[in-house]
Image (cartoon, helix red, strand yellow):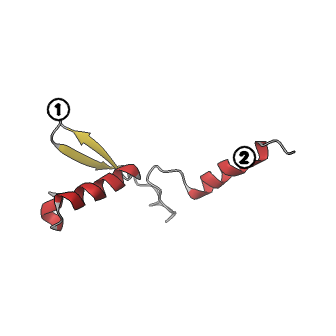
Amino acid sequence: MIREYTGWSDWQVRAHIKQLEEMEYIGVRTSSRGKEYSYILTYQGQGEEHQERCYLNLTSVEQIETLMNREDEALPRG
């Protein structure tokens, strides 16, 4: 369906789907036969109420900075 809609080659579709999967924007489901794939968005309505940034279940930049600061503070000074 993606190939039909976009007109992209099989390689292009696979490459972009793989990137979206690695970035955790989509989840991949296979059929019981293992040859048919379906994809689900990991978006669950985050950010809609207050127009805040939506990270689709990814760790936000602010959370990463906080974690990094905690690790820096825990390092022994010498």
- Extreme residue in the top direction: 32
Q: Nearer the viewer, residue 15 or 21?
A: 15
- Extreme residue in the front direction: 78
Q: Are marks 2 and 1 in contact (CB under 8 Å)?
A: no
- Extreme residue in the right direction: 78
Place of residue 56 in the rendered image (x, y in percent of width and height, measured from the top left) = 43, 53
| SS label for mark 2 | helix
User: Amino acid under label 2?
Assistant: Arg
Q: CA distance from mark 2 to mark 1?
A: 44 Å
Could you tell me which residue is drawn at 67 percent across and 50 percent down?
Answer: 68
Left or right: 25 in relation to 16 = right
Place of residue 26 in the rendered image (x, y in percent of width and height, measured from the top left) = 34, 50
Q: Nearer the viewer, residue 51 or 66?
A: 66
Could you tell me which residue is drawn at 41 percent across and 53 percent down?
Answer: 23
| Residue highlighted by disc 1 | 32
Place of residue 48 in the rendered image (x, y in percent of width and height, measured from the top left) = 44, 61
User: Amino acid under label 1?
Assistant: Ser
| Residue highlighted by disc 2 | 70
- Extreme residue in the left direction: 4
Place of residue 22 in the rendered image (x, y in percent of width and height, measured from the top left) = 39, 50
Left or right: 9 in relation to 45 = left
Mark 2 neighbour class, 10 Å CA radius: few under 14, some 14 to 19, many 20 or more: few
Left or right: 14 in relation to 59 = left
Could you tell me which residue is drawn at 40 percent across and 54 percent down?
Answer: 45
